[in-house]
Image (cartoon, grey):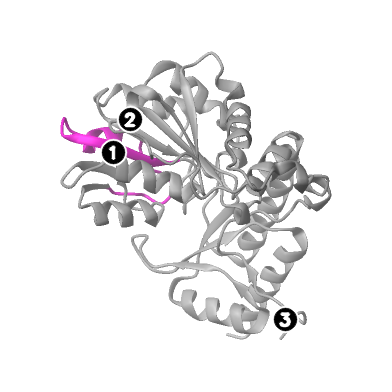
């Protein structure tokens, strides 16, 4: 049995954070003395918001920064959804939405999911005049399904204009078909759309805790958070600004992820393991009754962590983050070794 020799740290294949690009040399020229750490970071925050809004200049769209994409989601839901408000979302999507909505006391209408082949009109059919919000994760976590621009347009014309549509685009930079431009087109046509994005995934900056909302003023039902940029540091903002000044980084990363994702598809095909095609930086594959046993095996013998799912209609699915070629090989060795030992 091949066992990974370097046991100095756990390789995390469960969090979907990028590692393929070395940004240390890019951010090393940030001058800490010029950040004025004794002051609140209003100037840096406004500069970053302006950079984010560069492609939306002709629209009445605003950017609002938060300490992480998850906080951007939580803040929007807490500020706009009340107890007994009706919210429509997929039965197989990011767990945080339901967790927050249950805490609020919202009434959740769950759209049955067909593991990567969801029909967008199912969301419209599940909506009613009472529906306050529809949530889409695009590409979806954990299935990797991407709704097209036409899909989302069809949804928006088939629900009330008074219903908000929250689109979580945490993984949008990894998707094909120029998907990152979808938001710009939707904002030009509808005012009830809110988009969430993050620096944690494609930018590989989960540690700086930075995400944001994109929205029309008209779509907010209540006053936004009263403390601007609370919980966001000057250093985090400076790093994000520096990275955004080099847009080719994301293009390079997407190419690397696409290459490695194809390798993972081929590897799983060779082993006869069912998997879903993904428009994100992760792949969902099916291990059936071996799911938990393999996760434990990989952790103890190869010091790698993958994410088992037990709520996708049937047990047995595992989500794997696509990482560097070197680290993906360690995962492949762990799965080969596990199957050979059966």
Residue 105 position in % (x across, y down) = 20, 52
Q: Residues within 10 Å of mark 1 (few under 14, many from 20)?
A: some
Q: Pointers 2 and 1 in contact (CB under 8 A)? A: yes
What residue does disc 3 label?
7
Mark in the foreground, 3 or 2: 2
Density class for disc 2 (Cα within 10 Å; few <14, some 14-19, many ≥20) is some
- Comparing labels 1 and 3, the label whose residue is closer to the camera: 1
Element assignment for label 2: loop
Which residue corresponds to mark 2?
220
* Residue 160, percent from left and from top: 24, 24
Task: Decide if residue 221 is on the left or right side of residue 249.
Answer: left
Quadrant containing the N terminus is: bottom right
Tell me how far mark 3 sits from mark 2, CA to CA: 49 Å
Which residue is the site of mark 1?
80
| Residue in the image at 57% along x and 85% along y | 342
The verdict on residue 116 being magenta is yes
How far separated are the C-alphas under marks 2 and 1?
A: 7 Å
Please state which of residues 7 and 106 is positioned toward the viewer in this rendering: 106
Q: Closest to the observer: 104 or 160?
A: 104
* Front-lying residue, 261 or 173: 173
Residue 252 location, quadrant: top right
Disc 1 to disc 3, C-alpha distance: 46 Å
- The answer to whether the residues at label 3 and label 2 have Cβ atoms under 8 Å apart is no
Which residues are drawn in magenta?
111-137
């Amino acid at each position: 049995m091949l066992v990974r020799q370097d046991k100095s740290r756990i390789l995390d294949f469960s969090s979907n954070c990028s590692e393929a690009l070395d940004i240390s040399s890019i951010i090393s020229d940030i001058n800490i003395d010029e950040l004025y750490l004794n002051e609140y970071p209003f100037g840096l925050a406004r500069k970053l918001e302006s950079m984010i809004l560069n492609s939306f200049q002709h629209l009445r769209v605003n950017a609002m920064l938060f300490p992480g994409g998850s906080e951007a989601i939580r803040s929007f839901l807490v500020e706009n959804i009340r107890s007994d408000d009706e919210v429509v979302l997929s039965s197989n999507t990011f767990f945080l939405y339901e967790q927050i909505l249950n805490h609020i006391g919202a009434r959740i209408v769950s759209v049955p999911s067909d593991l990567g082949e969801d029909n967008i009109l199912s969301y419209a059919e599940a909506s009613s005049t009472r529906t306050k919000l529809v949530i889409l994760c695009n590409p979806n976590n954990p299935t990797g399904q991407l709704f097209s621009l036409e899909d989302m347009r069809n949804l928006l014309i088939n629900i009330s204009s008074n219903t908000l549509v929250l689109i979580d685009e945490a993984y949008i930079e990894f998707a094909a078909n120029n998907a990152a431009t979808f938001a710009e087109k939707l904002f030009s046509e509808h005012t009830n759309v809110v988009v969430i994005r993050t620096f944690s995934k494609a930018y590989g900056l989960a540690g700086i805790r930075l995400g944001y909302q994109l929205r029309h003023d008209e779509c907010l039902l209540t006053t936004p958070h009263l403390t601007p940029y609370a919980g966001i540091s000057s250093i985090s903002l400076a790093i994000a600004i520096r990275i955004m000044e080099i847009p080719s980084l994301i293009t390079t990363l997407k190419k690397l992820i696409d290459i490695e994702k194809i390798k993972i598809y081929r590897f799983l095909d060779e082993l006869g393991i069912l998997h879903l095609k993904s428009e994100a930086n992760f792949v969902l594959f099916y291990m059936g009754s071996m799911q938990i046993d393999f996760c434990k095996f990989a952790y103890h013998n190869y010091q790698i962590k993958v994410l088992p799912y037990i709520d996708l209609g049937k047990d047995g699915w595992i989500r794997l983050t696509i990482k560097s070629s070197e680290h993906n090989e360690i995962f492949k060795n762990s799965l080969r070794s596990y199957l050979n030992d059966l």
